Image (tube, rainbow, N blue to C red):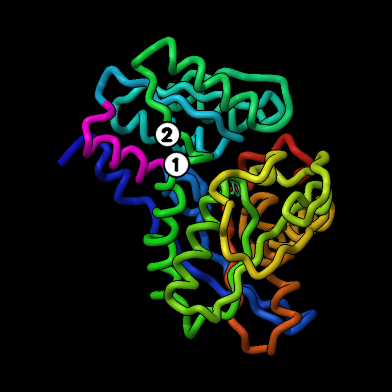
């Protein structure tokens, strides 16, 4: 047994639950990723990248995990760094909610903020820092194929075992694209008839060929199409406006008792749109990505 093994074993195997919408007589299924130990789907990627780095001695007790993130990946690495005894430095936009910053610092990680919008400036900062200090270990969540592979094998294995019958459609937003690319590849390998759709904010529908502008759905659509999304055999894209995402998130909070954040609401909006186009007993799956507690200072709680 290694330090932190118990914590790592808590990651994944999240429930898949039915969400019944009586108003439109449709049910969509939500994978409860907010129940991971640090509160988001990002625990999966952080676990897999650290275990793989340990297996090839690419990380040791002097290492500092350095990552650019909108917050959830930072929280996941800060948690695992605390449990395993690694240093962690997180580069994030100063626009990310204060709650996320506080959680990262509370785990003992260092926070480096930047003011530019989008992720690309932060990614470049991590590259430059790593060039000048060999102690930095870069997980590179935006381009690391382990991000996709983890969902393709682990998340999809769970989905296939948990679904009451064959999955007709899977819908998800993208930040790094790891969830969407991995689930798309894995689900289509298991059943080529499963349709997979990308959800994008209406205000930043890049895959739909539009310009990226400001939106309120935290954790997704960072202003560029990430490399992991290239060549993903999607069946289509759906747009969800920021106000609709917040309204659905509040419904999930108040009518379903699920304390999830705004990307979960956006995902459920899009999944419901897909379900409405399909026969009533179709199985449409989406992801409930993270917890609402990290958004007290945002519009969600206004
Ligand atoms: C709240 C939230 N939802 C969804 C996602 C998207 O996940 P992925 O990076 O796998 O595309 C993220 C990613 O950071 C996130 O923080």
Looking at the image, residue 19 lies above or below residue 31: below
Magenta highlight: main SS: helix
Spatial CA span between label 1 and label 2: 7 Å
Residue 168, image x, y percentages = 58, 80
- Cβ of disc 1 within 8 Å of ligand 1? no
Residue at the image position 64 percent from the left and 32 percent from the top: 119
Q: Quadrant of residue 152?
A: bottom left
Tell me if residue 106 comes above or below residue 212 in the rendering. above
Quadrant location, the N terminus: top left
Residue 189, label in figure: none
Residue 34: x %, y % from top left: 53, 53
Q: Which residues are magenta?
A: 46-59
Whether residues under marks 1 and 2 lie with C-beta atoms below 8 angstroms apart, the answer is yes
How many numbered marks are there?
2
Along the line of sight, the residue nearer the viewer: 205 or 267: 205
Callout 2 secondary element:
loop
Circle 1 Cα neighbour tier, 10 Å, few/some/many (<14 / 14–19 / ≥20): some
Which residue is located at x 66 percent, y 77 percent? 20
Name the residue beneath numbered marker 2.
Answer: 139
Q: Which mark is residue 144?
A: 1
Q: Position of residue 39 (x, y in %)?
A: 50, 46
- The residue closer to the viewer here, 105 or 76, is 76
Q: Residue at x 70, y 78 (%)?
A: 275
In which quadrant is the C terminus drawn?
A: top right
């Amino acid at each position: 047994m290694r330090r932190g093994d118990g914590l790592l074993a808590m990651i994944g195997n999240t429930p898949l639950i039915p969400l019944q919408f009586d108003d439109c007589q449709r049910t969509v299924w939500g994978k409860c990723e907010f129940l991971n130990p640090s509160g988001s789907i990002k625990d999966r990627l952080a676990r897999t990248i650290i275990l793989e780095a340990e297996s090839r001695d690419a990380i040791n007790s002097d290492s500092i995990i350095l990552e650019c993130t909108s917050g959830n990946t930072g929280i996941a690495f800060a948690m695992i760094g605390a449990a395993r005894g690694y240093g962690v430095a997180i580069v994030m936009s100063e626009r990310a909610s204060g709650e996320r910053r506080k959680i990262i610092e509370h785990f003992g990680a260092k926070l480096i903020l930047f003011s530019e919008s989008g992720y690309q400036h932060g990614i470049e900062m991590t590259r430059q820092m790593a060039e000048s200090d060999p102690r930095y270990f870069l997980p590179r969540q935006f381009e690391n194929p382990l991000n996709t592979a983890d969902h393709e094998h682990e998340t999809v294995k769970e989905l296939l075992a948990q679904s009451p019958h064959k999955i007709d459609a899977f819908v998800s937003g993208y930040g790094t694209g790891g969830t969407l690319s991995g689930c798309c590849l894995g689900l289509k390998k298991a059943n080529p008839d499963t349709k997979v759709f990308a959800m994008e904010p209406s205000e930043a529908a890049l895959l739909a060929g539009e310009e990226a502008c400001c939106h309120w759905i935290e954790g997704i659509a960072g202003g560029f199409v990430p490399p992991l999304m290239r060549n993903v055999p999607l069946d289509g894209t759906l747009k969800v406006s920021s106000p609709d995402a917040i309204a659905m998130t509040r419904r999930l909070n108040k009518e379903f008792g699920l304390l999830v954040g705004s990307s979960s609401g956006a995902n459920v909006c899009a999944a419901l749109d897909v379900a409405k186009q399909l026969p009533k007993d179709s199985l449409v799956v989406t992801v409930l990505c993270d917890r609402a507690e990290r958004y007290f200072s945002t519009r969600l709680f206004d």
